[in-house]
Amino acid sequence: MPDSTSYELYKAYVNNVREFITTEQELRRTINIGLKKNKYGAVERLTKLYALLYSTFSEANFMKMILTPYGFNQDFVDQIIKQDNIKDRWYKCIDLGFCVYQTKWKPKKSSEIPNKIQELKRIVDRYVVSPSIIRNKIAHGQIAEALNSKQEKLNPDLTQELNDLNQVKIFIWFQVQERLTEIIEDLIESPNKVHVNLYHTKIQNLTTYIKKTSNWDICSKMNTPSMKKRKPPTI
């Protein structure tokens, strides 16, 4: 487990994550009100803040996960934190997580661990790394028009991604993130063979959720019972 001094940091991140979850609920509620009232300009701007909120939540949730008691030792925590970027930190976390797993339980097949690692990394790429690129653009003042990495030219592809953001997509990011970190926490703690017994169920539930929500968008959101009662557009 991490050093005793890290426990205070863990508790701090627990509080931070709790605040992020409350803020997410409040911001999502505000966006829903804007949708009901057809205030699409306000919804678009709030949605970009929602995307920024997701990535900051993701960072706090990640730190809470790697500092969880009875999980990684401090050396592993230090190895993860010193990685250069979000992708490398998540990848290192997954790799070291399976190192912990192998010290406790022997896999039945040699392909089991490599397959699990690739499975989780693909989810990280889509639901953590890609959103972080959008977050960086917004955090660096590019809320409407994105620039390239050197900030010397416009980046129309990323600008389009900014324009394509919607509340439904970001809500799914939050849900996937929570399920993903729960799986990794099982992996590094694994009390009473929790990871061995529950991994396949949890990863199946996660992949089922991803598949089920793949066609969710604002149109389907507006057709839900809670959203149908909305004010007519102002002319």
Image (cartoon, helix red, strand yellow):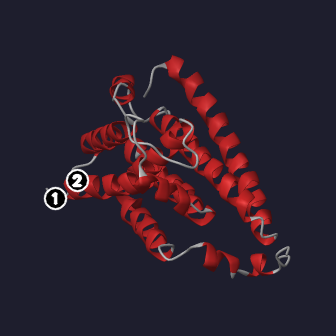
The local crowd at label 2, few if under 14, some if 14 to 19, many if 20 or more residues have their Cα within 10 Å, is: some
Instruction: Point out residue 227 in the picture as x, y percentages from the top left corner.
Output: 76, 76
Of 108 and 78, nearer the camera is 78
Question: What is the three-letter code of the residue carrying label 1?
Answer: Ser
Left or right? Give the position of 220 relative to 124: right
Q: Residue at 72% x, 65% y: name it.
A: 40
The residue that disc 2 covers is: 113
Q: Contact (CB < 8 A) between labels 2 and 1?
A: yes
Q: CA distance from mark 2 to mark 1?
A: 6 Å
Q: Is residue 215 above or below residue 4?
A: below
Question: What is the three-letter code of the residue carrying label 2?
Answer: Ile
The residue that disc 1 covers is: 111
Q: Residue at 60% x, 66% y: name it.
A: 168
Query: Considering the image in quadrants, where does the C terminus appear?
Result: bottom right
Query: Considering the image in quadrants, where does the N terminus appear?
Result: top left
Instruction: Point out residue 18 in the picture as x, y percentages from the top left corner.
Output: 67, 42
Q: Residue furthest left?
A: 110
Of 17 and 126, nearer the camera is 126
